[in-house]
Image (tube, rainbow, N blue to C red):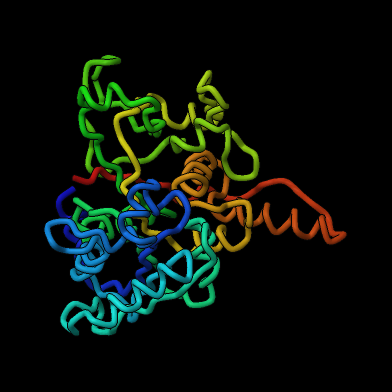
């Protein structure tokens, strides 16, 4: 209701968060070969309307209470150097949180979740906002954070509608693989009759286009096998969802808010390499488990103990939080 939303917005304004901006980190960024070449290895510096892409990400953080400094994680030493030089030249009033963003050079080809794992000891806030330096966010971050606070979500993500295909796109040899997003079906709507999407909807199912096309996914769990011949849904998720609409006209806009539990899972599961490709589908797939999300961490720790000579066990506990998704512009 309106009062709950208002309280959530006030909570989001008062909440201090940490912010991470990713550049050249796996499938979350980097762009195509032509883009990388045109930008001399740093697509985040590509100007859009005379403003480099990375500055849009930094400006988007301006409306939040950001614990300083913002961490700018960059895959590759050369790109990190170029971005470091650019950030050093920014005026002080362009620094989110009042401190110059700190550029951290990471190994080339590092995934987005792997990048967070590299700086896990520095991520101590209750919520961490993760943006891409190579995308322009159309949704107000304060509203995204308010949704995250109101739902007490393990992870919140922004999804946007794809642009309509043009004749030039139709002639492309290999179109980009579609993301598959499962959202609650609108009440009273018949199948195939509505494309309406609530701005704050629970994410029931997710399969990243790249992972779906290759049969990949965290820990070898394939949400969509190679060839896209089928999409697998866990029975417990189907029962919990009741009715779901599977969408292929949305894509992950590379804006995520992570709770402490989500960060702990990244730290505990080395198989999680990307946020969009691995973490989001993994959490969506298991959110109906008893005791979620604590049960996931408990299971990971038990497996680690078993590998070290301890004993493994089952999952137990009480129902917990969920995974939320919202639509960006």
Residue 89 location in percent, x, y?
23, 81
Identify whether 121 is placed above or below 284. Answer: below
Q: Residue furthest right?
A: 309
Name which residue lies at 28% across and 45% down.
326
Residue occupying image coordinates x 51% and y 24% = 231
Residue 62 location, quadrant: bottom left
Q: Position of residue 22 (x, y in %)?
A: 39, 62
Residue that sits furthest to the left in the current view: 49
Residue at the (57%, 52%) spot, across then down: 272
Q: In the rendered image, is residue 8 in sight?
A: no
Name the spot of residue 280 as percent of width and height, x first. 46, 46
Q: Position of residue 205 (x, y in %)?
A: 44, 35
Q: Is residue 83 above or below residue 248?
A: below
- The residue located at (20%, 52%) in the rendering is 139
Please state the total of marks drawn on the protein image.
0
Tell me if residue 158 comes above or below residue 188 in the rendering: below
Q: In the visual, does 77 lie left or right of 138?
A: right
User: Does residue 1 show up?
Assistant: yes
> Which sits in the foreground, 217 or 297?
217
Work out which quarter of the rendered image holds the C terminus and state it.
Answer: top left
Left or right of 63 on screen, residue 304: right
Residue closer to the observer: 90 or 20: 90
Q: Is residue 100 above or below residue 118?
A: below
Give the image quarter of residue 180: top left
């Amino acid at each position: 209701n309106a009062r709950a939303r208002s309280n959530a917005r006030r909570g989001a304004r008062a909440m201090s968060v940490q912010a991470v901006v990713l550049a050249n980190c796996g499938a979350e960024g980097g762009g195509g070969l032509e883009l990388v070449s045109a930008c001399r290895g740093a697509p985040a510096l590509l100007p859009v309307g005379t403003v480099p892409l990375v500055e849009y990400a930094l400006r988007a953080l301006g409306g939040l209470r950001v614990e300083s400094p913002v961490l700018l994680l960059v895959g590759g030493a050369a790109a990190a150097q170029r971005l470091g030089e650019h950030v050093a030249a920014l005026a002080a009033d362009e620094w989110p949180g009042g401190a110059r963003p700190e550029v951290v050079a990471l190994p080339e080809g590092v995934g987005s979740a792997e990048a967070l794992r590299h700086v896990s000891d520095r991520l101590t806030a209750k919520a961490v906002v993760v943006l891409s330096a190579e995308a322009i966010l159309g949704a107000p971050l304060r509203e995204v954070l308010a949704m995250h606070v109101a739902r007490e979500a393990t992870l919140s993500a922004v999804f946007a509608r794809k642009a309509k295909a043009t004749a030039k796109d139709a002639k492309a040899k290999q179109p980009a693989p579609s993301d598959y997003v499962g959202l609650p079906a609108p009440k009273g709507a018949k199948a195939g009759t509505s494309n309406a999407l609530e701005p704050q909807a629970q994410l029931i199912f997710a399969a990243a286009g790249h992972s779906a096309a290759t049969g990949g996914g965290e820990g070898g769990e394939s949400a969509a096998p190679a060839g896209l011949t089928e999409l697998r849904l866990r029975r417990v998720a189907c029962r919990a969802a009741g009715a779901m609409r599977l969408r292929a006209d949305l894509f992950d806009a590379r804006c995520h808010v992570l709770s402490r539990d989500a960060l702990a899972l990244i730290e505990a599961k080395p198989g999680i390499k990307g946020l969009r490709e691995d973490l989001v589908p993994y959490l969506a797939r298991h959110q109906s488990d008893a005791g979620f999300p604590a049960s996931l961490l408990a299971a990971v720790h038990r497996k680690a103990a078993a590998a070290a000579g301890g004993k493994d066990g089952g999952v137990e506990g009480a129902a917990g939080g969920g995974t939320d998704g919202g639509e960006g512009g």
